[in-house]
Amino acid sequence: MSDPTHDDHDESHGSIRLYLGVFLALCVLTTLSFLTYFPWWRGAVSTEMSRLVMMAVSCTKAMLVIIFFMHLKWEANWKWVLTVPASIISALLIFALIPDVGLRMRNASYQRMIHAAERPAAEEKEPGNGHPGAGHHEETQDRETVRPAA
Amino acid sequence: MSDQGHGPNFDYQPALPISRGKTFMWLFLSTEIMFFAALIGTYIVLRFGAISWPSTHDVHLAEIYGAVNTFVLICSSVTIVLALEAAKKNHASSAKGWMFLTLILGTVFLGIKMVEYGAKFSHGIYPQHPHSGIYEKPDVYYAQAVRLRLNELKADLQGVGDRTPEQDQQIAVIDEITLKLLTPAEEQLRDHPDAPLGRQLLWKLADKIYPLASVHEHPIGKNESDHTGHVSASPFKLASTGSENGAEAHVSGLNDQHHWLKLPIMIPGGNMWASTYFLLTGFHALHVVIGLIAFGILLMMTLNKANAGVIENVGLYWHFVDLVWIFLFPLLYLF
């Protein structure tokens, strides 16, 4: 792999069968992440776990594309020089943003909470005949719980 | 073990063992990695830091379009790899065929994206004013915006010299909305500012104009025909399914029943959603467009072994575009 002349005589690396295999894997993985959309999946798996699965699937797909389609598997050592620093900086950026997400509620002021957008409550009766008493008592509900049942 | 025998025979490596074009493409891609990492990271912070975020169906985002687009981009990645392989074997015509297929697939991606954008725009979901009609909550400002829009519509209609029956019907609809939904809410707020009824009526107004899919269950199977005519006796017909948005049946509100109304809509978290969605997908679509231009230039060249390097570089770029979408699809559509 470290031999730069290795590339030249190794024309076998781009076999069509390999590319089609990667393509099939990518399709299967896309289907897998799309499965999380369906109600039976959502009923069985928690949102956090679904997101973890989706990100794992995405990373796997990204690695497949990078390694095979972008030929990094067959490249010499220069590939590390270009990809590793960029990846490190990207990762640092993401890590630097984590506190913004993780600690967002620590300093959330009362003002911010009461001015948060509210969701309308589902009407109990059939929609259309106005029943003004219905629907004002789920003000700051977690939005995960009100995803559409599709 | 020892290098005694080699003596003065130094083996200098003058630069990276790849062509300059490829070097610069990879350098460019490493900056692109950071660019999209920043965008996606910002999206994650804004999305999970937001107190409210609309569900995908609230903003007329259909997951199936995203999934199909993912598939299209994966296919195009394969076709451009096959174009490169054909060019390496000096099969110029088959390389051109694969390249053309890649161009077609990229265009299909953009076409689906345009259909998706159209679904947002037709519902008044834009990233910015003055087009954007998104209000975060149904308060007095929302009511005021609705009244302004209704007044504007009515003034325009009344300015017409001899009105058609259709325009008379439109005025009737405007009056009915004003008298039955808007005015009672505003009067309640004026007379009893501390009582909850005024706020509830405002909720009701917002709900009639733009019913949120996450609030109303999808009435699948209950197919009341809505497309019989736009002039219904009452504008308050709700919870009828319209299948204009492809696979997704959604609840239709006043804006759907009367497309000329274009009243302000209420989507909690909708403005931030629109900003991030259009920014991320817009930058990605821009990259797709640039890729398509590159394909067009390549198609004018002879795609033989001599030009395999150019195809490889464009291919690297295109795979990266695919890569970005691989992350955007779950983040935007499925999270």
Image (tube, coloured by chain):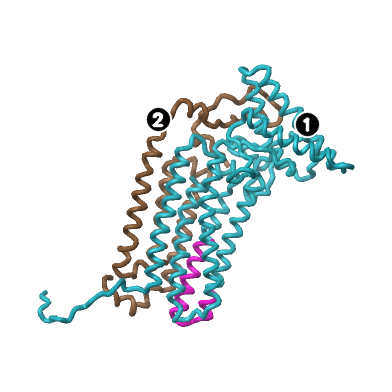
* Residue marked by disc 1: B176
- The image quadrant that residue B29 belongs to is bottom left
Q: Residue at x 36, y 39 (%)?
A: A99
Image quarter where the N terminus of chain B lies is bottom left
Percent of width and height locating residue B174: 77, 35
Colour for chain B in the figure? cyan
Tell me if residue B209 can be seen.
Answer: yes
- B175 left or right of B18 in image: right
Q: Which chain is brown?
A: A
Within 10 Å of disc 2 (Cα), the crowding (few <14, some 14-19, many 20+) is: few
User: Is the same chain shared between marks 1 and 2?
Assistant: no
Three-letter residue code for mark 1:
Glu
As helix, strand or loop, the secondary structure at mark 2 comes to loop
- The image quadrant that residue B275 belongs to is top right
Marker disc for residue A7 = none
Up-down: is A50 above or below A135?
A: below
Q: Nearer the viewer, residue B268 or B56?
A: B268
Tell me if residue B224 can be seen.
Answer: no
* Residue marked by disc 2: A107
Percent of width and height locating residue A103: 38, 35
Task: Tell me which chain the residue with mark 1 is part of.
Answer: B
Q: Which portion, as a residue range, is magenta?
A: B72-97
Q: Residue at x 33, y 80 (%)?
A: A9
- Per the image, is A138 magenta? no
Percent of width and height locating residue B333: 52, 48
Q: Which SS does the magenta portion mostly show?
A: helix
Three-letter residue code for mark 2:
Asn
